[in-house]
Amino acid sequence: MTISEKVALVTGGANGIGLACARQLHVAGWTVVVADRDEASGHELTKALPGSVFVSCDVSDGVQVDRAVAVAVDVGAGRLGGLVNNAGRTARTTFADLGESTWRSLQTVNLDSVYRFTRGCLPALTAASGAIVNIASVAGLVGEEGLAGYSATKGAIIALTRSLALELGGLRVNAVCPGQVNTRLMERVTSSPELLEAVVARIPAGRLGEPSEVASVVAWLLSDQASYVNGVALPVDGGETAGIKETALGTWPG
Ligand code: NAD
């Protein structure tokens, strides 16, 4: 089966990293189905990417997830070759202030959605010898101060990815771990020059990442070019998690 015959479902694909994934997969010849709750952006997407399909879906609602999966399976008609579990939210707060409703919401949107979409798509993906890419985060590889709840969901996604890679045999399951990427999620940082400078100082690349730089890795992982890549959690972070960068502390050289 060549890529041009395949269909990919991208959750949270109406904006940011998911939108960049939808665009790059479209360019690579995939038919893209996007499940997102942002209807305005979703309908824009179908105009920009002819042949793509938008499904209005709150990924925290099991019934809506089932409906989105049914649409993708229907559009795929035996060719659902890719699932990108990308939809996510964050909540920056101290652990002391992390109330249970926020904790639950992070789990439901970020983690339960991966469980539901993956289970729902599994028969179709297996039949098409497809692949799954889960969008985790560097905050799932290392801890992140002020993001304990978010970090817990992303760490769980990485663990789930590895377990599924072992269990699902013919289906490749990988995770991508973006660092600091210039999307709405990063508005708190990009709207403050001081904060932006402090964040960028931690990153060997010396800048934030662009959504397209994550999307190109996702598109590669879904493609046959990555046919022997399975069970990895790949940082796409400009080197941020490579180790301790002394210049960020203002102590080097000297
Ligand atoms: P974004 O806010 O630009 O886009 C997120 C998309 O998900 C939006 O289209 C939004 O409508 C959708 N979405 C959110 N909650 C939803 C819900 N309940 N139901 C349906 N759709 C929903 O954010 P982004 O930066 O593109 O984030 C995409 C993924 O990348 C997330 O999983 C995020 O955790 C991860 N990530 C982002 C960064 C970063 O720096 N931007 C870093 C690491 C990981």
Image: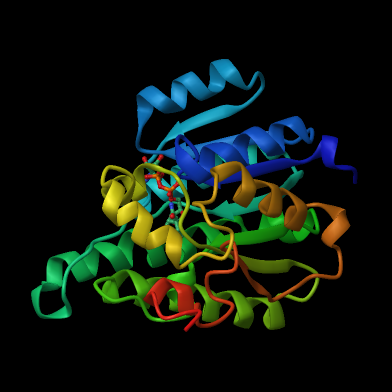
Q: Residue at x 16, y 74 (%)?
A: 94
Tell me: residue 191, above or below residue 60.
above
Toward the viewer: 91 or 179? 179
Is residue 108 toward the left or the right of residue 87 in the image? left
Is residue 172 toward the left or the right of residue 215 in the image? right
Q: Residue at x 59, y 59 (%)?
A: 205
**Residue 41 placement (x, y as % from top left):** 41, 26
**Residue 48 placement (x, y as % from top left):** 58, 18
**Residue 182 placement (x, y as % from top left):** 45, 45
Q: Quadrant of residue 108?
A: bottom left
**Residue 220 placement (x, y as % from top left):** 76, 53
Whether residue 188 is visible:
yes
Toward the viewer: 76 or 180? 180
Tell me: residue 83, above or below residue 245.
above
Q: Residue at x 30, y 47 (%)?
A: 193
Tell me: residue 75, above or below residue 140.
above
Whether residue 60 is visible:
no
Q: Residue furthest top?
A: 47
Is residue 144 toward the left or the right of residue 164 in the image? left
Q: Residue furthest right?
A: 1
